[in-house]
Image: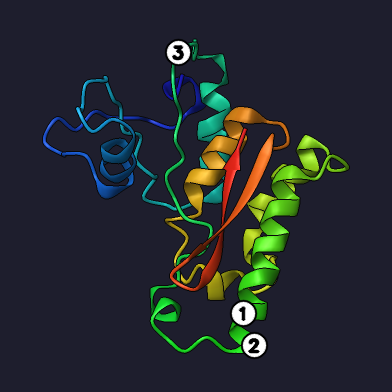
Amino acid sequence: MLQGADLAPALDPQRGLDHGVFVPLKILYPQADIPCLQLSLLRSLDPAAHLQMGQALRNADLRDVLVIGSGFSFHNMRAFFSPDTPETRAMNLAFEAWLQDTCSNPALSPAQRRERLLHWEQAPHARYCHPREEHLLPLLVCQGLADTRAAEVLSVPILGKQASMIVW
């Protein structure tokens, strides 16, 4: 399916699971008794390509398959260990509100949702919350796969910052 979407996937039998796979699965399945496939980000970090990756997987038989877009809605490591101020809190909350609205607002069409995510850097304080996009891009793969609004959005505080868990 990825080849059919011109994404040129390749297996890498030498690479082990990275922390985006290892950590959630260690918590969910500590016996490590389930088959697992890691789908890595594209080197380009192109939002459109990551949405396309999810879209390509729509034709897969995903019955009895758990897809985890293991990323983070806030990933500014420097900010985690800097003093919390009203300004930084407002920046964090503005991006989280934009992300939650983008993923779950029933008034947005799938095309509007995709367009907003393609241009996520234009969201309020996007680069404060994501100096680099690696931890946001798994969400775009999941949105591309779901192509609908999120069924549930949970806000969680992590290390003094607000973050979101989004479920389709």
The image shows residue 119 at horizontal and vertical percentages of: 67, 57
State how far apart marks 3 and 1 are (Cα).
39 Å
State how far apart marks 2 and 3 are (Cα).
44 Å
The residue tagged 2 is 86
Q: Residues within 10 Å of mark 1 (few under 14, many from 20)?
A: few
Residue in the picture at 50% in, 67% down: 130
The residue tagged 3 is 64
Figure check: 84 above or below 165: below
The quadrant in which the C terminus is found is top right
Marks 1/2 in contact by CB < 8 Å: the verdict is yes
For residue 49, say whether it is visible.
Answer: no
Q: What residue type is labelled 3?
A: Asp
Left or right position of 86 against 59: right
Q: What residue type is labelled 2?
A: Pro
Q: What residue type is labelled 1?
A: Arg
State how far apart marks 1 and 2 are (Cα).
5 Å
Name the secondary structure under disc 3.
loop
The image shows residue 37 at horizontal and vertical percentages of: 30, 27
For residue 45, say whether it is visible.
Answer: yes
The residue tagged 1 is 89
